[in-house]
Amino acid sequence: MDKDKNMDPQPIGVGYFGNIYDQFRGKVKEAFDFLIAHQDGDLIGVFYDEEIGDIDLVWGSSDENAGLKHIIDKHVGQGKDFITIDEARLAIENTINTGDKIKNNLDKVIYELEGKRVVVRKNLRDKSTGRMIEDKKKWVVTSYDNNVPKSDKLSAFTLTTPESDKGGRAVASDAVS
């Protein structure tokens, strides 16, 4: 057995989103699997658009509302945009590869295919200061199904709140968890 096949890819540097890897170019499923397993990282060129070039996939965070972690936390699960991570992965890949660019400006590109959307930033800014960190980085910020009204989507809060009133607001409970 070849030892190298069982070894994790080695980073080529460190950036804003953690270790940077260039071994996942065009390998969408492997990139998703790697980021989910490591919960950190910046994978260069997972997607490609002839007009704008390489598009990276980053783990990101829910706090920043950006990256794969944000997509999984906010948009994947029962009552959300995608039931499974595989469904999200396929939607993102197909939308970037064959969807229409419904917005393409200096800051972002929005791809759409059959109501599914993928938002790609064309730069990287520090969220707290707005300072430009990298002006040519293209990376997946989020993805969602625009066919499903927001009012029909369950939030992570709704899914984890044990009791709520008819308006979906949390109510006090005697239960201690």
Image (spheres, rainbow, N blue to C red):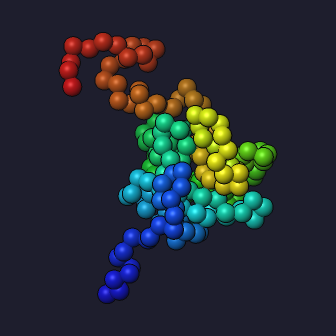
Q: Quadrant of the C terminus?
A: top left
Q: Residue 51 at x, y = what percent? A: 78, 61
Q: Is residue 166 above or below residue 9?
A: above
Image spot of residue 46 (x, y percent): 58, 63
**Which is nearer the eye, 33 or 122?**
122
Query: Does 169 appear above or below 92?
Result: above
The N terminus - image quarter: bottom left
Return the residue nearer the eye: 79 or 139.
Answer: 139
For the point 41% across and 28% down, the residue is 157
Q: Residue at left 55%, top 26%?
A: 151
83 sits left or right of 92 in the view: left
34 in relation to 161, above or below: below
Task: Classify residue 13 as left or right of residue 48.
Answer: left
Residue at image location 59% in from the left, 69% down from the top: 26
- Up/down of 146 relative to 158, above or below: below
Foreground residue among 50 and 171: 50
Occupied quadrant, residue 158? top left
Task: For residue 120, say whether it is visible.
Answer: no
Q: Position of residue 24 (x, y in %)?
A: 53, 68
